Structures are given as structure tokens and as C-alpha cells.
Amino acid sequence: MTNREWHLISRPVGWPKPEDFALVETEVRTPREGQVLVRNKYLSVDPYMRGRMSDAKSYAAPFELGKVMQGGAVGEVVASNAEGIAVGDHVLHFFGWREYAVMDATAAVKVDPEAAPLSTYLGVLGMTGLTAYAGLLRVGAFKEGDAVFVSGAAGAVGSQVGQIAKLKGASRVIGSAGSDEKVKLLVEEYGFDAAFNYKNGPVREQLAEAAPDGIDVYFDNVGGEHLEAAIGALNLRGRAVICGMISQYNATEPTPGPRNMVKILQNRLRVEGVLVGDHYDLQQQFVQEVGPWVASGQLKYRETVVEGIENNLEAFLGVLRGDNTGKMIVKL
């Protein structure tokens, strides 16, 4: 049995190029004792993966050149040499960017396809959902009555942050996105109080119009101009949650920081990064609270689905361009 998997061939400089990658055919091996073989059904592509393509020191080890990359995936067990996981079980794991994966059973988490669609375990009920939940409620110390601004608000994390804030009693939720269509989605489907297209004018001016009384929490997926505008809009003892900075992931030169950082001192602001790996202790609480919201339709989600392992790279590049609405998923 053969397998197709994506390898990193060279480290991208600036925007990743197709020649930095190769789709390689390999032979699928039999699982050893304590291992399972999984046929992947859905793969996740996420902005953070761009950082792992570089060899710069970061919070995660870089992808190795000439070897298969990694990412979230969910699939069906087709061979098992481990207790507790049987053929036909569905599992969540971190061996994406490939059609088949052999792994230790301890690296696979069983999921129930009857409880929720399999793809949701990569998005609204998975890593991106927990990132939104922990980032807003724990790191952002959100409380009822707060005004919240979310950048990249039509993405997998941002859309969930805004909706959770509304469900938890935010006084006002504002979002930014990169198209008028996404702005309409934020207001009409996700229930944001206001939203704007950051391409239509300076973020600072559009945010001031959308949040005339300022904001208490900023959830940052973009960085750059958005972060500077948010620092200027945060009220006394406001909190900025730094989840991503997609505006500068492909920069080839150091990017300038916000020019108004004195506001952090003046307004006693708190700026803190969020990495989902620090908050897995909230996993059970997250599923117990968010699962019913998803099931009842109170919390809505979108997925952008690209079909075929051969299109995995293009799906990833699409995330960097902002082509996706909600979670970008590759269906095999």
C-alpha cells in the first residue's frame, strides 16, 4: 500500500513557493506493537505552520528538511496493534500532511463521529476552538459587560472568540475582516455588533467609529496596524491577547512595533500571548460548555473545504492569503 505525503524541501524566504515543497510517494508500513495505522480523512492547515517552516528559534520545533510535515488530522483506524483502539475507531492526532499515518496509540485520541462531524474536531471543537475559549476567558480575563475587538474575525479562531464573547454577555463585539462579504457574515450570521473591512481605510479610524467608547479586550490574530490601533482604543486596564500576527509571517525584514506603546503604561494595559498548549487543562470544560452551543446552533461555524492531498499546500497558502472563511480543512 502506498502513501502520499508532503515534505519540506527548502526553507521559504518571504512567501512560501511550491518549489519549497514536494508531494512524495512512500510505502505504508505495518504498525508495531503499541501502534495503529490511520487513514486520514480530514487534515488541518493553520497559520502557525508558517513559523515551523523557518529554522528561527520559536515555541515549536521547525519542520525538518526532506521529511514529512505535521499538523492536526482526524481519521479512521485501519490496522491496530494496540489495546484500547480498534479497527474502525476514529481518532484525532497530529500526523497530518499525509494520507496514512502510523503512530503510537498514546498519540491518538478517540473521537465520536456520531456526536459531531469529524471535521469539527479540527476546528470549532478542536484546537482552534480551545484557543479561542482559553484566550478570551483565561488570558483575556473577559468579564460580562466588556467591549471586545477581534482582528481576523472571520477566521476559525476569531469567529469563535466573537461569538463566545456575545454568549458571555459582552457589551459590544467588533470584528475586522478582509472583505465586505466577510464583514456581512460577522454581523448577520455571527452576531457581531459591528465589523469593518480593514482594506477600506485606516484601522484606527474604522475602529474608533465602531467602538466610540473604546474596548476592554483585544484579541489579535493579525498584528501590525491592527495591534497599534487596538492599543490606542483600549480602556483603562484593558487586555490584549496576542494569538497570531499573520500580517508579518512572510516578512523578510524585521517589522516595526506599535508606535504608541506609551499607552500601555498610561492605561495600565496588559499584553499577553496565548498558546493553546498551555491550556489543555481547560479541554473538558471547553467541550462541556461549547459543545451544547454548537449542537443548538447558538454558536455558528463555517469551514472552507479543499479536496485532495494534492491540494494540501494550496489550502495552506490560501490560509496565509485569507481565502478561508472559518476553518480551512482538507478532505481526503
Image (cartoon, rainbow, N blue to C red):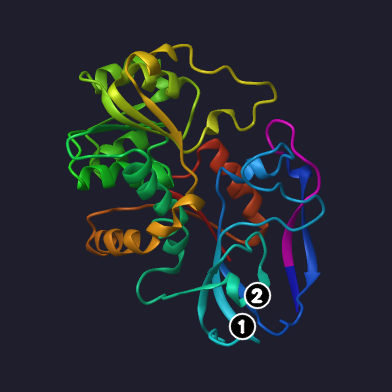
Q: Which mark is residue 78?
A: 1
Amino acid type shown at disc 1: Val
Please tell me how crowded label 1 is: few (under 14), some (14-19), or many (20+) other residues with Cα within 10 Å.
some
Q: Main secondary structure of the magenta part?
A: loop
| Residue 59 placement (x, y as % from top left) | 61, 43
Name the one closer to the observer, 11 or 214: 214
Q: Are marks 2 and 1 in contact (CB under 8 Å)?
A: no
Q: Residue at x 20, y 20 (%)?
A: 213
Q: Is residue 302 left or right of residue 243?
A: left
Q: Circle 1 — which element?
A: strand
Which of these two is toward me, 127 or 76?
127
Query: Which residue is labeled 2 in the image?
Result: 104
Q: Of residues 297 and 254, which is closer to you in this image?
A: 254
Work out whether mark 2 precedes mark 1 in sequence or the reverse, and give the earlier one.
1
Q: Position of residue 254 (x, y in %)?
A: 65, 21
Identify whether 314 is placed above or below 90. Answer: above
Visible residue check, residue 178: no
Q: What range is drawn magenta here?
A: 4-16
Q: Which residue appears at 29% of the width and 53% of the height?
A: 300
Image quadrant where residue 232 sits: top left
Residue 45 location (% of width, % of height): 57, 51
The quadrant of the image that shows the N terminus is bottom right
Which of 101/243 is in front? 243
Q: What amino acid is labelled 2 in the image?
A: Asp
Q: Position of residue 291 (x, y in %)?
A: 30, 63
**Horizontal side, residue 258 vs residue 10: left or right:** left
